[in-house]
Image (cartoon, rainbow, N blue to C red):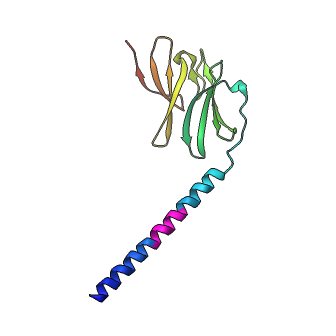
Amino acid sequence: MRRQVLLASCIALLLGLIMITKSTARTQEATETYTRTPTQGAVPKSYGRLAAVIPDSIGTGLIFEDAEGVIRFVSVTGMKEGELARYDGTPTHGGIPKAYGHLVSAVVNHGSTALVFEDANGVIRFVALTGVTEGELTRN
């Protein structure tokens, strides 16, 4: 009987120590998170309006669309990661037709990014970064 009480007491003490250690570690992680300085960067106003925010391989990616429809991909630090041109007539490699309308959003699914456009007629298009149209919805 004494052995069982001693064993139960030791187990309870061990579990209590584990709980205290975990609690202290969580408090320390939270403190580090709140004391970390935020990332600072700058994005030129010429990049246009912020159209979407997506997760990417180095953190958070911002997607901007300017008045001419040029789409720019920028990291949260302000570094430009890429650009997609828009065209009216002759297709450009990797470009997107201006007739697709304005960039509404972006979607990341299984590591690939699709851009979502809506034109003046309400047609919604899902376009891969390569410029290939993956789907189209019409609104009635």
Horizontally, residue 17 falls left or right of residue 96, namely: left
Q: Does the magenta stretch include residue 3?
A: no
Q: Which range of residues does the magenta coloring cover?
A: 17-25
Q: Which residue lies furthest to the left in this view?
A: 1
Q: Residue 32: name its quadrant.
A: bottom right
* Total tally of numbered discs in the picture: 0
Placement of 32 over or under 57, stated as above or below = below
Q: Position of residue 37 (x, y in %)?
A: 69, 48
Placement of 105 over or under 21, stated as above or below = above
Q: Residue furthest bottom?
A: 2
Q: Quick one: 103 or 36, which is closer to the camera?
A: 36
Magenta-drawn stretch, dominant element (helix, strand or loop): helix
Placement of 58 over or under 121, stated as above or below = below
Horizontally, residue 59 falls left or right of residue 16, namely: right
**What is the quadrant of the N terminus in the image?**
bottom left
**What is the quadrant of the C terminus in the image?**
top left
Q: Where is residue 59 in the image (x, y as percent from the top left)?
A: 59, 45
Q: Where is residue 73 in the image (x, y as percent from the top left)?
A: 62, 34
Q: Which residue is drawn at 47% across and 11% down?
A: 121
Q: Residue at x 52, y 18 (%)?
A: 100
Q: Which residue is drawn at 66% across and 52% down?
A: 35
Q: Quick one: 85 or 15, which is closer to the camera?
A: 15
Q: Quick one: 11 or 64, which is closer to the camera?
A: 11
Q: Position of residue 36 (x, y in %)?
A: 66, 51
